[in-house]
């Protein structure tokens, strides 16, 4: 066996969820940062807008959502991202504007992916 070959076959379960106008790839046990949600730390949240569910070689694609599918997650913390500097400059006019922005986010840990028929 070569060094870069995988010795075991892994069945990977994942889902694509939509929250805050963005799409996220979520797998059980994974931690992701999503747009700020009004849920306290330690609380749980249910994402019911699931666009795709994959379990090994079975893929369910929703049009636009997978019927009956949902993703359960636990809120780990509320936070703010690193500062992004917005700097505007007009040459030869002595005009400069500097502004900073820190986006709020919620870090969640994906608990389980529940398909329309089975729990993954």
Image (cartoon, helix red, strand yellow):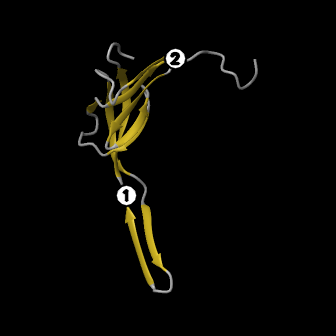
Q: Is 38 on the left-hand or right-hand side of 23?
A: left
**Quadrant in the rendering for residue 63:** top left
Indicate the secondary structure of the residue bearing disc 2: loop
The residue that appears at 24% across and 39% down in the rendered structure is: 39
Q: Give how far across and how far down residue 15 sits, in percent.
A: 41, 27
**Quadrant in the rendering for residue 101:** bottom left
Instruction: State if disc 2 and disc 1 touch (CB < 8 Å).
Output: no
**Quadrant in the rendering for residue 117:** top left
Q: Residues within 10 Å of mark 2 (few under 14, many from 20)?
A: few
Q: Which residue is mark 2?
A: 11
Q: Give how far across and how far down residue 89 sits, in percent.
A: 46, 76
Relative vertical location of residue 120 with respect to residue 20 in this rendering, above or below = above
Relative vertical location of residue 86 with respect to residue 82 in this rendering, above or below = below
Relative vertical location of residue 21 with respect to residue 96 in this rendering, above or below = above
The residue that appears at 66% across and 16% down in the rendered structure is: 7
Q: Which mark is residue 33?
A: none
Quadrant of the frame with the C terminus: top left
Q: Is 30 on the left-hand or right-hand side of 50?
A: right
Q: Give how far across and how far down residue 22 sits, in percent.
A: 37, 42
Q: Which residue is mark 1?
A: 102
Indicate the secondary structure of the residue bearing disc 1: loop
The residue that appears at 27% across and 32% down in the rendered structure is: 45
The furthest residue to the right: 2
Q: CA distance from mark 1 to mark 2?
A: 38 Å
Sequence-first tag of 1 and 2: 2
The furthest residue to the front: 63
Quadrant of the frame with the N terminus: top right
């Amino acid at each position: 066996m070569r060094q870069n070959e995988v010795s075991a076959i892994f069945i990977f379960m994942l889902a694509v969820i939509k929250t805050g106008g963005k799409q996220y790839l979520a797998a059980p046990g994974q931690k992701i940062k999503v747009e700020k949600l009004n849920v306290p730390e330690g609380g749980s949240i249910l994402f019911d807008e699931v666009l795709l569910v994959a379990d090994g070689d079975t893929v369910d694609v929703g049009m636009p959502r997978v019927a009956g599918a949902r993703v359960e997650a636990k809120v780990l913390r509320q936070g703010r991202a690193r500062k992004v500097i917005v700097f505007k400059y007009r040459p030869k006019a002595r005009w400069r504007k500097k502004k900073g922005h820190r986006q709020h986010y919620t870090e969640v840990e994906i608990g389980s992916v529940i398909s329309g028929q089975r729990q993954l």
